Image: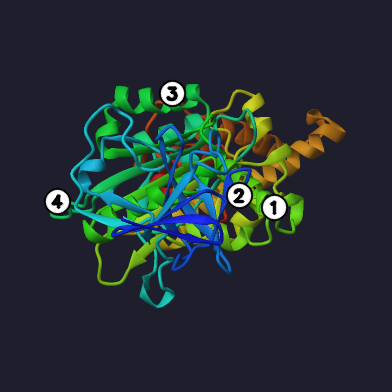
Amino acid sequence: MLRSYRNGIIVMEQVSGREYIGLKEIVGPLIVVEGVEGVGYGEVAEIYLPNGERRLGSVLEVGEGLAVVEVFAGTTGLTVDETRVRFIGRPLELPVSVEMLGRIFNGRGEPIDGAPPPLATKRVDVNGLPINPTAREYPRDFIQTGISAIDGMNTLVRGQKLPIFSGSGLPHNQLAAQIARQARIVEHSADQVERFAIVFVAIGVGHDVAAYFQESFEESGALTNVAMFLNLADDPPIERIVTPRVALTLAEHLAFDEGMHVLVIMTDMTNYAEALRELSSARGEVPSRKGYPGYLYSDLASIYERTGRIKGRPGSITQMPILTMPNDDITHPVPDLTGYITEGQIVLSRELAARGIYPPINVLPSLSRLMKDGIGKGRTREDHPHIANQLYAAYAHAQDVRALADVVGEEELSEIDKRYLKFGEAFEKRFVNQGSDENRSIEETLDLAWQIAAILPKEELSRVSEEEVERYLPR
């Protein structure tokens, strides 16, 4: 080990990197190291407190002899004179393996379930890269969630990004846990055996929510096929920046190295965006909409675009990010930009939740842009596209009739309009509404859809063929 001085900073040169004693300044979750050489963006820094405690950080910015480091565990306890920083010459990496399924990790990928660290197949840079568009294979094939409002009318497809837009107090955590427990691939032949896994990411959640997720998976037995990453509300907010990237690194290994189909569920991306805003403010950057950094779009895209299928490889990554809309405002920057990047959205309704309907999915503003490519003959059932369109059209008309009934009174409606009112009520209470432990197959969902459609006269069923009416409509 060699000791030298540069601009008043003590530099300890080691075989595995350079160590600097003393900081230029501490700004919120950031530290500034002076007199550095050969440090790169994204490089890992080891920060040693005066008491010997070790923390990890990542280089956010490199200038003339300066490096700005983001400290994942926060800067509490650091001092300007005695803190030591060592740059190790490589980015933050995660040791990955199939053995990580069934385990629980913190936001940095360290096991917190009391068991030994899993044996690693290899170490991978957590920053990753979006999939090259020329290497992408078009998303196809249906993923069954067991939720009728999703499977029947906003179908999730392998390789898709389908977010859930929720609001404070709505049961999005319950819905996320249910999807994680129930989601599976529907095999179309006995010879077709494909491996499926869940990567579940909780970002900035409370201890009670984290315990709920853990207990839900353990009691149902689903944990054996789930890798959980938990970033808690009392963890340093800056750690939330790395949590989804760590989880997606494991998902990429399972999908593209091990050939598995992986569903990544992330809740709550609004907490991630808040941490990004805090980091941007600490760096002194000029704020954009609502105080978020101007690069919020590209930063979210760097997470969402690590989803899809790659030509020539059997696996896939499907994402269901969940975010809470502040004040239920769908034009807020986080849901607004998320909607631009992803292929649709599932919108939860506060009105439906107040009426005791679970899951309170409002199907009219919800959309799955890739649904048409993942359903139909050979994938779900040949009548699926048509009955889904019929339910959409009929429910939209039922909403118009409800608005009219509020003005003129239900007794003034025509007989057809009264049937539509009855249809709308049955659609919400029987099709959308289901128990938190009720796992409906796609066959059950489509059969139920026809039962609801039977409330309307046959001449009103304009989106389905006569052959389908004869075959599926209850007599």
SS for tag 1? loop
Left or right: where 67 falls relative to 40? right
Tell me whether the residue at label 3 lies in contact with that at label 2, contact meaning CB atoms closer than 8 angstroms: no
Asked if the residues shown at circle 3 and circle 4 are in contact, with their CB atoms under 8 angstroms apart, the answer is: no
Which circle marks residue 212 in the picture? 3
Residue at the (21%, 33%) spot, across then down: 116
Q: Earlier in the sequence, mark 3 or mark 4?
A: 4
Q: CA distance from mark 3 to mark 4?
A: 36 Å
The residues bearing labels 4 and 2 have C-alpha atoms spaced at a distance of 47 Å
Q: Secondary structure at mark 2?
A: helix
Q: Position of residue 75 (x, y in %)?
A: 55, 39
Query: At label 4, which amino acid type do we have?
Result: Ala
Residue 242 in percent (x, y) is at: 47, 49
Count of numbered badges drawn on the protein: 4
Which amino acid, by three-letter code, is at mark 3? Tyr
Q: Nearer the viewer, residue 1 or 164?
A: 1
Q: Circle 3: is it few (<14), some (14-19), or many (20+) Cα within 10 Å?
A: some
- Which mark sits nearer the N-terminus, 4 or 2? 4
Q: Which residue is mark 2?
A: 276
Give the residue at mark 1: 292
Q: Identify the mark at residue 190; answer none if there is no mark.
A: 4
Of 66 and 45, nearer the camera is: 66
Type of the residue with mark 2: Leu
Instruction: Give the mark nearest the N terminus, 3 or 2.
Output: 3
